[in-house]
């Protein structure tokens, strides 16, 4: 079916907020505008998941509070910065040159810029390879262990299309999806949004989703400039200052989250309510595989997600969040009782083994994303490093978290965060694989897990997330795999002490 005729977003025919689930000419116009910024969407007038992700990426790249809702601020920004980017072209196609370099203008450049934005770099997808794109390319190449020459050749293209690692997804810092204090060493969507907001306030940091020294310095500089304690810790006061004068996609952003079982929340949370209790509810539902905008507004999409969750858990499907639903929401995002948090590196294997059999896309698997601020379903991305981050979080063995395999390797090689490289693997160590070889752990063919046993010689077993069922050879989940150090791929063991 043809898409509905486009309607200007600011006209009275379009709602104040355009949100997931709507089908209209307003959505057609939205998709056209996003495509003008390099989104590469199918224009069908239907606000589905791909459109939601494109909205969030655009908001993160332009320092708008990331809520996935197209309100006045996002509409205005889309028209103010509207471009006429050529349609994206796959970088590996015959239509693109072997090396894409500064000065070129084409759909190949649009695709390059779209991929850079997906990896967290704040570039405008206008199809014009200018100085800003060149800087982002060199930064991306450095982060992935490539020659930082700014020319997008075979290796850089492969890294850009990496499917083994999850680029950070922006979320609202004030929502329950983010910790109350964001500090150095953390990574994921909350850090990516923090970096975008810092840049929107005049700082200059790479949006890579990793809270390292550069981000720390930017946070401290921002705090000093705004009369805040310059401790580098992003708590409520710093978050409020970051969002001042930056409108949310649909208004003022999400209310501060409130624990559902507290006296501040009603005994039943129902459609129509707007509060921090709803913010918390939406975040929890996202940890169980929903993909809601965390805005504190209990609308139809939230009600539908509640009913889906209740059906999955065998609860009364009424869309009302009472005591049983609250208990179930919190029940599956806490560690198993047999392997409580704490205990350091000695508990790494205990916690990992307790998860064996967890299937991708399940509420349990999706809850691992809370360790890195990701609320996507594990059916939709490669989550092996997310699983390792979650295990580390439960034990407190290291403060490091990241969705990129190569970042774990780099920190271990640098001796940071109580991580180091070892040639004498033991149960509970981390093991990283580079299927392509070369020991650079870039290019999109990496994997990571927890060592379970070492047989001597080259053989060992590992507990791995996002791996196939060894009994069927299909599916994806947490399973124990037989591995070897002489099977044609590179292996590195990481000691957590």
Image: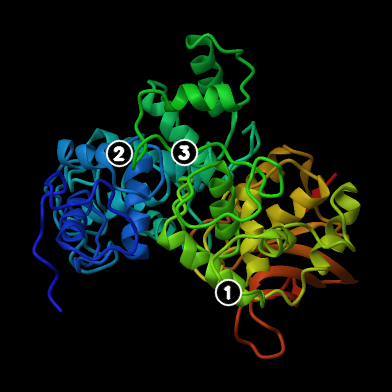
Instruction: Give the SS element for disc 1.
Output: loop
Asked if residue 467 lies left or right of residue 381, the reply is: right
**Residue 442 place in picture, x, y as percent:** 52, 56
**Residue 415 place in picture, x, y as percent:** 74, 38
**Residue 238 place in picture, x, y as percent:** 54, 23
Q: Nearer the viewer, mark 2 or mark 3?
A: 3
Which one is earlier in the sequence, the residue at label 2 or at label 3?
2
- Residue at position x 39%, y 51% in the image: 118
State whether residue 291 appears in this view: no
Calculate the distance from the C-alpha at mark 2 to the C-alpha at mark 3.
22 Å
Q: Which residue is mark 3?
A: 193
Which one is earlier in the sequence, the residue at label 3 or at label 1?
3
State whether residue 184 appears in this view: yes
Mark 1 crowd level (few <14, some 14–19, many ≥20, 10 Å Cα) = some
Mark 3 crowd level (few <14, some 14–19, many ≥20, 10 Å Cα) = many
Instruction: Give the SS element for disc 3.
Output: helix
- Residue 102 lies in what quarter of the image? top left
Asked if residue 399 lies left or right of residue 473, the reply is: right
Q: Which residue is mark 2?
A: 134
């Amino acid at each position: 079916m043809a898409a509905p005729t486009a309607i200007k977003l600011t006209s009275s025919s379009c709602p104040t907020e355009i949100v997931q689930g709507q089908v209209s000419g307003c959505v057609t116009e939205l998709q056209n505008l996003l495509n003008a910024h390099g989104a590469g969407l199918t224009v069908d007038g239907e606000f589905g998941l791909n459109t939601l992700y494109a909205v969030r990426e655009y908001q993160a790249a332009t320092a708008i509070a990331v809520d996935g809702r197209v309100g006045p601020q996002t509409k205005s920004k889309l028209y103010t910065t509207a471009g006429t980017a050529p349609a994206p072209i796959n970088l590996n196609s015959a239509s693109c040159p072997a090396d894409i370099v500064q000065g070129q203008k084409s759909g190949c450049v649009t695709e390059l810029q779209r991929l850079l934005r997906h990896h967290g770099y704040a570039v405008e997808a206008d199809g014009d390879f200018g100085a800003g794109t060149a800087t982002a390319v060199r930064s991306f190449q450095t982060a992935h262990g490539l020659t930082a020459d700014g020319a997008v050749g075979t290796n850089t293209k492969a890294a850009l299309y990496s499917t083994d690692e999850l680029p950070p997804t922006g979320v609202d810092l004030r929502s329950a999806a983010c910790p109350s204090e964001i500090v150095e060493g953390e990574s994921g969507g909350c850090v990516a949004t923090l970096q975008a907001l810092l840049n929107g306030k005049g700082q200059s940091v790479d949006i890579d989703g990793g809270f390292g020294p550069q981000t720390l310095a930017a946070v401290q500089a921002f705090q000093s400039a705004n009369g805040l304690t310059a401790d580098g810790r992003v708590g409520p006061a710093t978050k409020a200052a970051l969002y001042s004068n930056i409108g949310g996609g649909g208004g003022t952003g999400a209310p501060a989250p409130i624990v559902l079982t507290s006296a501040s929340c009603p005994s039943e949370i129902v459609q129509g309510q707007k509060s921090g209790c709803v913010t918390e509810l939406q975040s929890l539902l996202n940890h169980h595989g929903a993909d809601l905008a965390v805005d504190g507004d209990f609308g139809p999409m939230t009600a539908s997600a509640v009913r889906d969750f209740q059906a999955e858990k065998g609860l009364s499907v009424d869309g009302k969040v009472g005591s049983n639903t609250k208990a179930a929401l919190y029940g599956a995002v806490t560690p198993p009782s047999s392997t409580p948090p704490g205990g350091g590196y000695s508990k790494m294997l205990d916690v990992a083994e307790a998860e064996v059999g967890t299937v991708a896309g399940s509420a349990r698997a999706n809850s691992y994303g809370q360790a890195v601020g990701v609320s996507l379903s594990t059916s939709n991305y490669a989550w092996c490093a997310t699983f390792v981050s979650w295990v580390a979080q439960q034990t407190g063995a290291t403060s490091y978290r990241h969705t990129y395999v190569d970042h774990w390797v780099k920190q271990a090689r640098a001796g940071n965060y109580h991580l180091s490289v070892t040639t004498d693997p033991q149960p509970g160590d981390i093991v990283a694989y580079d299927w392509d070889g070369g020991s650079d752990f870039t290019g999109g063919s990496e994997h990571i897990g927890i060592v379970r046993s070492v047989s001597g010689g080259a053989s060992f077993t590992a507990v791995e997330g996002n791996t196939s069922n060894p009994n069927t050879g299909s599916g994806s989940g947490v399973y124990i795999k037989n591995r070897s150090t002489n099977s044609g791929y590179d292996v590195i063991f990481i000691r957590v002490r």
